[in-house]
Image (spheres, rainbow, N blue to C red):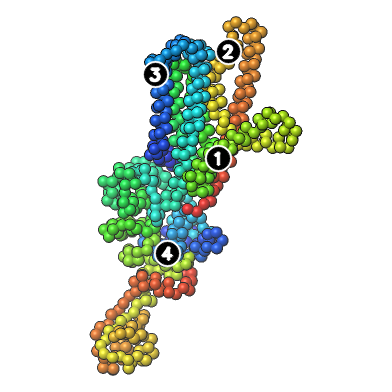
Amino acid sequence: MVGITEMTNWAVDLIDVRKIYGKTIHALRGVNIQVGRGEIFGLLGPNGAGKTTLVKIMMTVVRPTHALGTLLGRPLGHRGKLAGTGYLPEDHRFPGYLTGAQLLDYYAALGKVPRSRRKVNAAKLLDRVGMSEWATTRIDKYSKGMLQRLGIAQALMNDPELMVLDEPTDGLDPVGRRDVRELLLELKSAGKTVFLNSHLLSELEMVCDRVAILVDGLVARQGTLDELTEETVEYRIAFSGDARAIQEKVEALGASLGANVITVSGHDTGKVNAMIDLLRAADLSVESVQPHRFSLEDILVQVLADQSATPVARPVHP
Amino acid sequence: MQFWALIVDSFRESVDRKIFWVLVGLTLLITLVMLSVGFAGEEVTLFFGMWSTETDRFNPLSDIGRANLVGFVVYLLASTMMGWIGVTLMIIATAGAFPAFSERGALDVVLAKPINRARLFLYKYFATMVFVVLQGTLFFVLTFLVMWLRWGVWAPGYLLSIVFLVLLFSYLYCVSVLVAVKTQSAVAAILLTLFAWVLFALIHQAPSVFETFPDLKKRRTVYVAVRVASWIPPKTGDFPYLAARWSQAGTSIDALPYFDMDTATELERTQIERARQVEEQELAKNQFYSIGSSLLFEIVVVLLAMWTFARKDY
């Protein structure tokens, strides 16, 4: 069981979340994810990994087969705490007969936001997402990008402590994506927690404090970007000349020889120096030494290549 | 606040549908036709006085004439136009409400609000009836005003027809909603609801077969089973009867042509009064049975639909 102290520390604390559709489809197989307050947390993974199912379970849209943990300090599925969350689902469909302003008012009323605040917030948020001029236009006249902007505005109508955004930049042009990034950073600076599910890894890399990689219904990796990329640093030593004579020695030291490049994995600078010495001893000219850190995309590809994903242990403190 | 938000949303959804305006147009047309008819004593004028004839059957100055006029409006206009055509159009118009509401991507945001699913379902269920309440109110208030102001017939009980119409619709709408939450299909909801409507009428009428063919009553088990089965479905066929009873309350029995209260003897008057009391008690019992058993059916179906809605993943 989760202790009271811990319950208040994490904004999101998911423990052993499982979902089985029917009797055979294991969408989630025991997910553990922790998100600290004030963090921007990114969830990534390939299609069918269970990301959207997990988000829907958090927002009570899908009923879990088994789940422990808390959301904003209260047990998962606690209705009252949903008043403090904002949610933008993937592939949302808003009623076409409403105008943008009416939609914001409708969803905020369902979220128990008082009428006086609804009006002020709607005007402010429509302006914030660049939709003021379209406030009184029917939604069925909106483009996909406009719907996405409106969706983000509706998720903010209750001034939430926690924002859960499923593919928030879907359908947005580059300017729109930049706006969303700025908005997320604004929210973070205001102390809000953001839980982000996105396919766009570069986007996640730019804004997320921590990420989790979901593969086949399990968290394969979880941590800060530095933590995740630490093991994946490598040095690339470019040289000129024929290095076939030293190939065995290079490989014996745990490096790999490519076309005029030696790649040394990890943070081992001693090994890098040894390689440089080896090249010089063979009368080869060293042209450059470049550290290279893996991107999230590299890490995801690496994780997918390693199909033996195992659950990640739950950290003790946020 | 949440219920009101859903009511406002349902109102907006209703007026966005073409079928809403078709029904409004139908109501206005009926009102216009009624307005074109005038009564002055025994003279009846049609098409705003272009054609006239004389008859004592619709003389609004007599009890019989008033009862006949109200009966004409209830049975021909209210029952046929609203009870059949209107309700059919309303079923078609509202069948898509739940499938659209619970469509993947549409319901996600709503379910993530601080409202439990059972309550959300019930709020949406009742909010969708705004469509019928609006249409029913418009029809019955306008036709009531024509009867009162144009024909001089004061029948306030006629306005209760709004309630009976909403009840009739709700007996069928619960079936539509159950099918909709099970199948997510508006077409299936329409077809199965109309089928259920016919089925209810057949089951309700089934016991009369035993009156026509008394020999069948000898098959006791079948007879009892048919009688019991006829209690279960909603009494959708009772709408015109209920509307007529309340519309003509206080005038209908007085107006019965075979009783002339003015010339009746004291004994006859007492007998008539007693007969009236017995009839009223019987009618009250029938109304209670009709509405009560139908509402019971509706409650069971709504609970089943609510349970399905609440247990589903979206």
Residue annotated with mark 3: B47
Quadrant in the picture for the N terminus of chain B: top left
Alpha-carbon span between mark 4 and mark 2:
79 Å
Vertical side of A297 occupied by B104: above or below: above
Rate crowding at label 1 as few (under 14), some (14 to 19) or many (20 or more) other CA atoms within 10 Å.
few
Residue annotated with mark 1: B195
Alpha-carbon span between mark 4 and mark 3:
69 Å
Alpha-carbon span between mark 2 and mark 3:
29 Å
Amino acid under disc 4: Asn
Amino acid under disc 2: Pro
Residue B224 position, x and y percent, is 71, 35
Rate crowding at label 2 as few (under 14), some (14 to 19) or many (20 or more) other CA atoms within 10 Å.
few
Alpha-carbon span between mark 1 and mark 2:
40 Å
Q: What residue do we see at 35% from left, 90% from top?
A: A247
- Of tags 4 and 2, the one toward the viewer is 2
Q: What residue do we see at 46% from left, 30% from top?
A: B136
Labels 4 and 3 positioned on one and the same chain? no
Left/right of residue A313 with respect to residue B208 in the rendered view: left
Front residue of this view, candidates A43 and B216? B216
Residue B266 position, x and y percent, is 64, 6
- Of tags 1 and 4, the one toward the viewer is 1
Labels 2 and 3 positioned on one and the same chain? yes
Tell me whether circle 4 and circle 2 mark residues in contact (CB < 8 Å): no
Which sits earlier in the primary sequence, circle 1 or circle 2? 1
Residue annotated with mark 2: B257
- Of tags 3 and 1, the one toward the viewer is 3
